[in-house]
Amino acid sequence: MTQFCKECGEPIEAPTRFCTSCGAIIEQQKGLVPAKPTQSEPIKQHEQQTERTKEATNDMPAVPTAEPSRTKQTSEPLQTKQRSNKKGSKIAIILSLIVVIVLGGSYAALHTMTAPNKKISAFTEALTNKDDQLFSLVVFPEQTFYDKTQFFKELDDVVDVKKLQPKMEKAAKQALETNTSITVVTEDDVPFVRIVPTTDYALFNTIDMELATTKLELTTNEKKTKIQLGSDSVAISSKPVIIGRFVRGTYNIPVTIDGKTSEPLSVQVTGKERLQQETIAK
């Protein structure tokens, strides 16, 4: 006779220890069970099925869920990077402004230092104080010679600095307007300084100052005559030789004739002439 499970009422095949439908143990069942379960059995069957589903669910491995904190952690570096970029941009702008200010200040300072009137003021101040710095404020053509002591000595009676400065400022303005060199003369109407228009390193229009010079030309009838100019020895003959340019002053030039030291050649350069001729004799 066919047996039925006490738990679910489904037919079962013997021999077996478990119901193939609900899994209930049937080892201890005795007697026959009606083919149709009572009214309470479906409810009990549903409860048991629910319980088994719960147990099966609890036995299943946990499914990992998304962690919001990771998303937050991922977004934080992006936000930090954006903040760093903004901070870096601000620093770059500030540094650029500092560079512009420094360059602008340097540019303005250079313009002030190289302004024509600034140069002229420094020149006349050095002239008044008989300061050797005067010779660093002017430019010289090649082969120009000067004696600082003699230069200041010669100017005592011929230069009025108070009158000279306005003359130089006027000449500077004229030189820049016409782009030509202007010569300023002393009280004895002798060329003293030339104002030459030029541009400085910052391309500002400014001036150079050149002390007026005189070319010195020498000749001699003596044989094997030489003069000494600094470290250079120059041979002099009957053929005129221009030995260089000389700033206003008195010069004693060493001379050797036929290999023997002779009296120095004393030359007073007044600046009244562009070319001054002198003859060497025993």
Image (cartoon, rainbow, N blue to C red):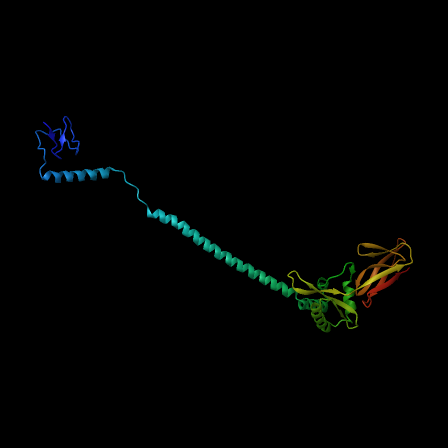
Given residues 123 and 19, the one toward you in this image is 19
- The image position of residue 20, as x and y in percent, is 17, 31
Q: Quadrant of the C terminus?
A: bottom right
User: Residue, x 37% and y 48% (percent of image)?
Assistant: 73
Residue 193 is left or right of residue 23, and the answer is right
Q: Quadrant of the N terminus?
A: top left
Residue 144 is left or right of residue 277, and the answer is left
Above or below for 105 versus 235: below
User: Residue, x 76% and y 67% (percent of image)?
Assistant: 152
User: Residue, x 81% and y 54% (percent of image)?
Assistant: 232
Query: In the picture, residue 38 is in which quadrant?
Result: top left
Q: Residue furthest top?
A: 15
Given residues 168 and 68, the one toward you in this image is 68
- The image position of residue 176, as x and y in percent, is 69, 67
Residue 241 is left or right of residue 212, and the answer is right
Given residues 104 and 244, the one toward you in this image is 104
Above or below for 189 versus 98: below
Query: In the picture, residue 50 is in which quadrant?
Result: top left
- The image position of residue 87, as x and y in percent, is 46, 55
